[in-house]
Image (spheres, rainbow, N blue to C red):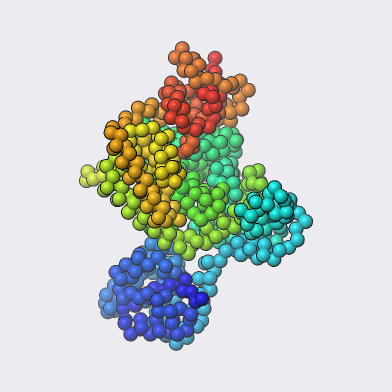
């Protein structure tokens, strides 16, 4: 069966005769059909077509797009816009002759991918189209996945691990053959071992693994990219511990994921925590405010690195460019403060113009981690480590990578990282744009039709988190953070029933699981794989949930959740590392702690105490425990929230004499 060719070309030329000749020449001398070609005669048409047709993979742009020699040439401005809008797409300039090559290079530098004369394209198109097709094929290559698939299909006898030997021990067992049949032959045949030298090493970044990592680096725009198969929790620890050594100072966002705090503990770092505004009403954090970041940098100019969360669970986006500017401001010639952004929930940031301004990689952050499995097409635990730091110590990084990475990594996970990267190269904009359109429609449907449940927008967040908005010189609202609408946060305060019952209803009635919840909100992820029938079921479940509450006679709930102190107060006598390993630490009941604090005793946390999700610690080692912390934890326990580091109402503490 003949299928449509995936290569779509946009040709931009204001001369209809030449446009028609070029179009005919391409069709005549390639496998492309007329439906693979789009044409535009001016910049406005071109921009509209480029925005609306996400399948476009190549652009031919007439460099002499102006109507008369006296008019300013709009081609260079259009080229800059296209490369800003979708930087992955190659743009080839068409010229009347080769004489203006120097002029083009001087005006637009390296923005264009190549240039050809129109006569070449009309009369001798085979070479040009061949070169373009080669670039297209190179962009959609999957070095590791292709080699991996070939190796598995060649079916070499294995005299090495894994022990099931391509599934034989499952298939031939009277007890395990059902397990084999459920997963299928390919799952077991593809479960390989690090002994397969042909495929290369994840630990040493060699062979086809290295080729896939280099291609991913180019796709995401990083100098170096490494694959990780134990999630971004481990990636964060690898990254952090490759930058700092014992005693180094680190400035840390207090609402970072717990893996960052564990990384600081294991590295023996001295930590200076940023304040992070918390809304007790909604139960969510805001990113640290820029004035707070600047103050902390000013107070800690000897800091080795500043670590921030690029995108919160609820989609609040920090302005990474301004953070980098502040880090440069307080760096010295012989001491540059590095910027490390945990961008686990925002791996698609560089593939859509609405998000690129907040992209950590495009903002030139030194270190960035991405959870490919959270928001891209990769298997669970698959993660990217991206590095732009010109002072990157590859050898030390490799040693830290050895510490955390298994010598028997999951090859399917590596393959999924390879294909996920290629997919974003070829159709990242298309997938993110489609997800955004679906999210926008869902948000409008909920906010326009439901009476109780609402989707929070950036203005709503600003009402409860004042630090994210200010006024400009003209008195207009100025947002200091961005917002990713693919993190849909439902305000369910109007529902007059416990969260546990709300979630149970959604599981039973809507057959759905949510990403995160607080006492007031439910967060849903609109991923690049979201489908309309799934959205319809979600919307239907919310309608039924609201109807049930109306029948019950709903009444708007009050949050009544104790606020958590925004500033982390660490004891000067203990580092995170020394408090975590303190031999005098002991388990203590929350009631006893509360009584002791009321009687003027001082307690320090010895372990992390972390409600999950979202994985933001309430207490870190060496932190002074206050009554507000105890009351907050007690409230979470009553609500049935899972709290890591708090078992049977006990946490590990150090009592100061």
Of the pair 179 and 607, the residue shown nearer to us:
179
Q: Is residue 120 visible?
A: no
Quadrant housing residue 104: bottom left
Q: Quadrant of the C terminus?
A: top right
Q: Which residue is outermost to the top?
A: 599
Q: Residue at x 31, y 82 (%)?
A: 16
Q: Residue at x 71, y 58 (%)?
A: 197
Q: Residue at x 47, y 14 (%)?
A: 595
Left or right, 373 with respect to 456, comes to right
* Residue 413 x/y as whole percent: 59, 53
Left or right, 462 with respect to 153, comes to left
Q: Which residue is outermost to the front?
A: 174
Q: Which residue is outermost to the left?
A: 474
Image height of 420 relative to 560, above or below: below
Image height of 195 relative to 406, above or below: below
* Residue 54 x/y as whole percent: 40, 65
Q: Is residue 403 visible?
A: yes
Of the pair 575 and 50, the residue shown nearer to us:
50
Image height of 151 relative to 179, above or below: below
Of the pair 628 and 340, the residue shown nearer to us:
628
Q: Residue at x 42, y 67 (%)?
A: 55
Image height of 257 relative to 102, above or below: above
Left or right, 201 with respect to 417, comes to right
Q: How many badges with numbers are in the image?
A: 0
* Residue 462 x/y as whole percent: 31, 40
Q: Which residue is outermost to the right?
A: 159
Of the pair 392 and 547, the residue shown nearer to us:
547
């Amino acid at each position: 069966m003949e299928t449509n060719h995936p290569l779509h070309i946009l040709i931009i030329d204001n001369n209809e005769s030449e446009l028609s000749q070029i179009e005919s020449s391409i069709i005549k001398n390639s496998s492309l059909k007329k439906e693979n070609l789009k044409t535009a005669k001016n910049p406005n048409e071109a921009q509209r077509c480029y925005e609306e047709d996400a399948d476009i993979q190549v652009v031919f742009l007439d460099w002499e797009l102006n109507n008369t020699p006296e008019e300013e040439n709009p081609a260079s401005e259009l080229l800059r816009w296209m490369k800003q809008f979708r930087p992955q797409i190659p743009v080839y300039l068409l010229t009347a002759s080769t004489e203006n090559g120097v002029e083009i290079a001087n005006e637009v530098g390296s923005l264009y991918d190549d240039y050809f004369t129109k006569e070449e394209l009309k009369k001798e198109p085979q070479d040009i189209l061949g070169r373009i097709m080669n670039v297209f094929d190179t962009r959609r290559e999957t070095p590791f996945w292709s080699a991996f698939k070939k190796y598995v299909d060649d079916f070499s006898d294995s005299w090495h691990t894994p022990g099931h030997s391509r599934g034989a021990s499952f298939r031939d067992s009277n007890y395990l053959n059902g397990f084999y049949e459920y997963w299928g032959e390919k799952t077991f045949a593809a479960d390989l071992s690090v002994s397969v030298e042909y495929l290369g090493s994840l630990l040493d970044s060699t062979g086809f693994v290295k080729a896939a990592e280099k291609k991913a680096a180019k796709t995401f725009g990083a100098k170096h990219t490494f694959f990780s198969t134990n999630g971004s929790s481990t990636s964060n620890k690898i990254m952090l511990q490759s930058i700092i050594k014992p005693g180094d100072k680190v400035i840390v966002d207090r609402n970072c994921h717990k893996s960052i705090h564990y990384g600081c503990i294991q590295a023996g770092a001295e930590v200076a925590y940023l304040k992070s505004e918390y809304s007790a009403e909604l139960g969510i954090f805001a990113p640290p405010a820029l004035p707070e970041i600047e103050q902390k940098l000013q107070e800690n100019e000897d800091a080795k690195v500043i670590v921030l969360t690029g995108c919160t669970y609820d989609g609040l986006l920090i302005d990474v460019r301004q953070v980098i500017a502040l880090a440069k401001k307080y760096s010295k010639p012989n001491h540059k403060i590095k910027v490390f952004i945990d961008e686990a929930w925002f791996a698609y940031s560089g593939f859509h113009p609405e998000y690129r301004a907040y992209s950590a990689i495009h903002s030139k952050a030194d270190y960035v981690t991405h959870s490919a499995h959270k928001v891209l097409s990769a298997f669970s635990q698959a993660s990217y480590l991206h590095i732009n730091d010109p002072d990157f110590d590859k050898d030390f990084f490799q040693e830290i990578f050895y510490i955390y990475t298994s010598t028997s990594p999951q090859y399917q996970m590596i393959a999924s990282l390879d294909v996920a990267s290629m997919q974003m190269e070829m159709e990242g904009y298309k997938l993110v744009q489609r997800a955004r359109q679906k999210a926008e429609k869902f948000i409008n449907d909920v906010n326009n039709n439901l009476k109780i449940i609402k989707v929070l927008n950036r203005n709503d967040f600003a009402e409860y988190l004042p630090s994210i908005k200010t006024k400009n010189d003209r008195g207009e609202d100025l947002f200091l953070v961005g917002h990713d609408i693919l993190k849909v946060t439902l305000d369910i305060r109007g529902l007059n029933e416990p969260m546990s019952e709300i979630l149970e209803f959604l599981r039973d009635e809507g057959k759905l699981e949510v990403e995160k919840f607080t006492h007031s909100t439910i967060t849903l992820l609109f991923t690049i794989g979201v489908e309309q029938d799934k959205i319809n079921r979600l919307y239907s479940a919310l309608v039924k949930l609201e109807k049930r509450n109306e029948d019950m006679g709903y009444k708007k709930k009050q949050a009544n959740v104790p606020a958590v102190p925004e500033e982390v107060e660490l004891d000067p006598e203990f580092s995170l590392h020394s408090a975590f390993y303190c031999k005098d630490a002991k388990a203590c009941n929350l009631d006893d702690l509360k009584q002791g604090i009321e009687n003027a005793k001082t307690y320090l946390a010895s372990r992390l105490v972390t409600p999950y999700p979202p994985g933001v610690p309430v207490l870190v080692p060496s932190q002074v425990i206050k009554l507000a912390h105890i009351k907050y934890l007690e409230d979470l326990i009553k609500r049935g929230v899972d709290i890591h580091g708090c078992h049977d109402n006990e946490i590990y503490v150090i009592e100061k004499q």
